[in-house]
Each structure stands twice: as C-alpha cells, then as structure tokens.
Image: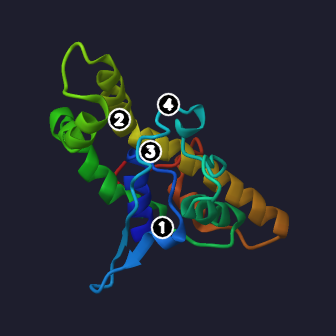
Amino acid sequence: REILREHTLDWLLCNFDTKGENFLNRTDGHLSSFDKEASFARIKDAGSQHMSTEYRPHANDTLYNVMFSEYARGNLDLDLQSTENQLQRIESMPRAEYLALFDRMLTQKYGAHGERNRKRTAVEAAIWERKANLREEYRRFYTELLARRRENLRERGAAPDDGARYLDAQGNFRFGSE
C-alpha cells in the first residue's frame, strides 16, 4: 500500500529515479521515499506521458517498474484499490493550491510566475495536466496490467486471478467508489 502511495507521488512529480535504496522504513513502521532531485526533469519526454513498466530514462530500472511487472507476471499480489485514497486527496486540491506546492522549485528553475514567463507557464500546465488526468491514467494503466496478469496466469495454467473484481462490464479497471 505504501509503495503504491509513493508511486502516486512520484508519478505526479514525474520522478523516474526511484531505486529501492531511495526508500526508508520509518521508526513508526511506515515507508517514505526520498531523493526527488530528478522531479519534472523528464516531464516533456514522450515516454513519461503514460504509466508503464517499460519507461526507463536512467541506467537503473525503477522500483515501480519491477513491482508492476511482477504483478503483471502473477508473481506478486497488490491491492490496486489502495491507490484510491491518495487519488481522492489529490483530486480534491484546487489548481492554485496544487501549483503552490511547486512554487519555490518552479521559481528557482524558471523564474517568477507571470504572463511573460512562457517556460514556467508551460511547465505549470504540464504539472497540472498530470494531476488532472491522474484517475484516467491509473484506469488505463491498471486495465493494461490486469490484462497482462490474466494472460500470464492463463499461460502458466495457474488458478484464475481475482483481478476480475476490479473490472467493469467492458473490462476496464474501476476504483471501488465508482
């Protein structure tokens, strides 16, 4: 659950430098990630526009690519519904409040916000678009993962997976509240 929560954060930050050693087990028993220096560096890359298990802009593979690939192979169980709590919190944030989270970083990289600062305006638009499309991006990605998982389990002759509980009548992933 906590790795899935961190995945949401890293996806929103467009952070693809997420190795296992970039996670800490906190003293309260929870998990936290760090090393967000690469955030937004790949926001314009074509491969970073959609969640996948293949996009790898750094020498190392991401923890998330490995985890989701293992899930798709049927070697790991994940509660895909656990993403929804984080998703709902993010969806509830209005644009100004959300973009204010990144103001300091954007000012350092692109200068002050203003109509004439087109670079910053473009990056803010890309950051907002990632947030605005988050639910649909997860829906597309999880639908793909579940299809791969069912096929891999079928090919191995394994017992049917319970992933069907996540799908609507058209075979698309749906969160529990939908």
Structural crowding at the residue carrying mark 3, measured as other residues with C-alpha within 10 Å and reported as few (<14), some (14–19) or many (≥20):
many
The label nearer to you, 4 versus 2, is 4
Question: Of helix, strand and loop, which one carries label 4?
Answer: loop
Instruction: List the residue tagged with mark 2.
Output: 127
Q: Pointer 1 and pointer 3: residues touching (CB < 8 Å)? A: no
Q: Amino acid at mark 3?
A: Cys
Residue at 76% over, 57% down = 151
Q: Earlier in the sequence, mark 3 or mark 4?
A: 3
- Element on which disc 3 rests: loop
Which mark is on residue 79?
A: 1
Q: Residues within 10 Å of mark 2 (few under 14, many from 20)?
A: some
Q: Residues within 10 Å of mark 1 (few under 14, many from 20)?
A: few
Query: Mark 3 touching mark 4, by CB under 8 A?
Result: no
Across and down, in percent, residue 43 comes to 46, 36
- Disc 4 packing (10 Å; few <14; some 14–19; many ≥20): few
Q: What mark, if any, has residue 44 been given in the picture?
A: 4
Residue type for callout 1: Asp
